[in-house]
Amino acid sequence: MSQHLFATIVTSTAVAANNRGEGDGSTLSTLQKITRGNDQYTTVSAEAIRWGLREYLQNHYETETNRTFNPDTDKYSFKNEKFSAEEFIDDDLFGYMDAKKGKDNEDATTKRRGALEISRAISLDPYWGDIAFGSKGGEKGKTSIHSTEVHCTAYQYTIALTPESLKKPERAALVLDAIGAVRHVGGNHARFLYDFRPESIVIRITDDPSPWIMDSFKRMGDTVGCPKLLRLVEVGDVAASELIVAGEIADTPYGEQLSKLGVKVFRGVKEAIAEAKQTLGTPQRV
């Protein structure tokens, strides 16, 4: 059976805002939103999270990444526009598509589906419409004042990866390293500094092709709990031996109860990531 890696991450709480907008006097909807139940929540696209993961890989493995971003020119460049999942980490993890037409207008598209799947990140807290106002400065006019939506919240998202679907399965360990060190998200969503590293994380390594651990975390007062995850372990739908739980959730009653059920619980996220990499059994890179 194939071995699958799943992880659900909840970030630290910070102020999310997209400062791109400059309006004509009207309020700008600069944060993406989704309705859940009777409330609205803000959301960060999977593409924006991928941007942060790509940035980590570029900074740490530049010679092994195909697509690199130059902040001075605000442009991407490729080492090899024919792509190579064997040669480049990002082509292997994120996939690619080069849409071209060949002779006689035949389809000559080169593509590879991304092995790493990432969900949208959803805020743990409802959005109540907070707005900040600012000025561009200089000559005043109808566009000199702009409004920006802001949301103080934490975000939750899930990743899924089957290491054997990679050209080099040991690259699965790099995904865990990147998740633990994402500085910010970007791309089409936003240009704000937001610490997207895990404040709490649940990792599942299993031969079950379904994650089961999506949406594990829930805001509970001033902290975060995981009642859905606890129930899954209690009823046996998810084996305790497949889970690694870490971060601030370890210091809550949920962490204590999961530990009693046989789940590996760590206070430190980096310690949990190291444990997960060892469980994956892929060769470690220096």
Image: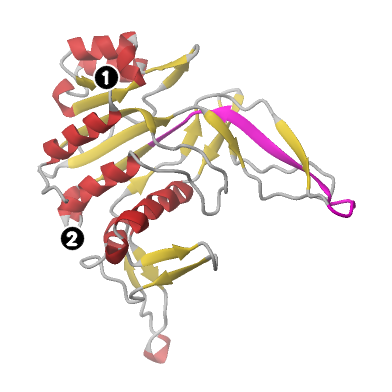
- In the image, residue 20 lies at what x, y percent? 66, 50
- Nearest the eye: 240 or 66: 66
The CA span between labels 1 and 2 is 33 Å
- The residue mark sitting in front, 1 or 2, is 2
Element marked by disc 2 = loop
**Which segment is the magenta one?**
138-157
Residue at image position (48%, 49%) is 48
State whether residue 249 is above or below residue 177.
above
Identity, as a three-letter code, of the amino acid under mark 1: Leu
According to the picture, the residue beneath numbered tag 2 turns out to be 167
- Chosen colour scheme: secondary structure
Residue 155 falls within the magenta-colored stretch = yes
Residue 198 picture quarter: top left
Residue at image position (26%, 32%) is 270
- In the image, residue 283 lies at what x, y percent? 10, 49
Identity, as a three-letter code, of the amino acid under mark 2: Lys
According to the picture, the residue beneath numbered tag 1 turns out to be 232
Classify mark 2: residues with Cα within 10 Å, few (<14), some (14-19) or many (20+).
some
What type of secondary structure mainly makes up the magenta span? strand
Residue 31 picture quarter: top right
Q: Earlier in the sequence, mark 1 or mark 2?
A: 2
- Nearest the eye: 117 or 148: 148
State whether residue 219 is above or below residue 100.
above
Residue 121 falls within the magenta-colored stretch = no
